Image (cartoon, rainbow, N blue to C red):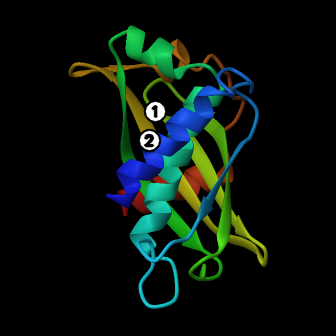
Amino acid sequence: MSGLLRNIIAFLLGLAAYGSKTIEGVTELNFWVTPFDSGIRVLKSDKYLQFAETAQLDYLIKVGKLFTIINAGASFVNVAQIVKFSRPVSIFSCVRVETQLVYADEKCAYFSHLLHTRKGQSAEVLVKMKFKMGRITVPPSSFLPMSFSAIPASILGFESALTA
């Protein structure tokens, strides 16, 4: 339930900044780690992924593309996620998530979500996302018109981990 409530709050707060960022930019979103997000003392590993999903929604709102996607009859689906943990996040911490589109090809868009606390970077969540219209995959460039010259090393490592 906390994930749904977090998404609703992020959506409502994000509307005030609709279209305020560029596609190339980095968006920031802050969360408080509540007892619903943690085990005994630290953030549960699945909550990192929920924070990333909410931050992704916030990104699409702030770059002004969420309603474009919805009006086109499309949806977005996270097909793979991987987390690189740096340090645990304790309960009642404030977490800042920096979201950026790092690469896109003809099928998928790749997002990086850096999670920071007062002590520094705590984790990085890489997300592989597809845009779908029914059963058809739509190129990310249809909604996120950005070109990339080379595949970043982090994405190459991500893809090799997925195939292993």
Q: Residue at x 64, y 82 (%)?
A: 87
Q: Secondary structure at mark 1?
A: loop
Circle 1: residue type:
Cys
Q: Residue at x 55, y 70 (%)?
A: 33
Q: Residue at x 45, y 77 (%)?
A: 35
Where 111 falls versus 122 (above or below)? above
Residue 65: percent from left, percent from top:
56, 19
The residue pinned by badge 1 equals: 108
Where 44 falls versus 56 (above or below)? below
* Numbered badge on residue 8: 2
Q: Nearer the viewer, mark 2 or mark 1?
A: 2
- Crowding at label 2, few (<14), some or many (≥20) Cα neighbours within 10 Å? few
In the image, 32 versus 72, the foreground residue is 32
Report whether residue 135 is seen: yes
Q: Quadrant of residue 146?
A: top right
Q: Is residue 30 left or right of residue 104?
A: right
Circle 2: residue type:
Ile
Residue 95: percent from left, percent from top:
66, 65
Residue 64: percent from left, percent from top:
61, 19
Q: Secondary structure at mark 2?
A: helix
Where 16 falls versus 124 (above or below)? above
Q: CA distance from mark 2 to mark 1?
A: 25 Å
Q: Quadrant of the C terminus?
A: bottom left
**Furthest residue to the top?**
72
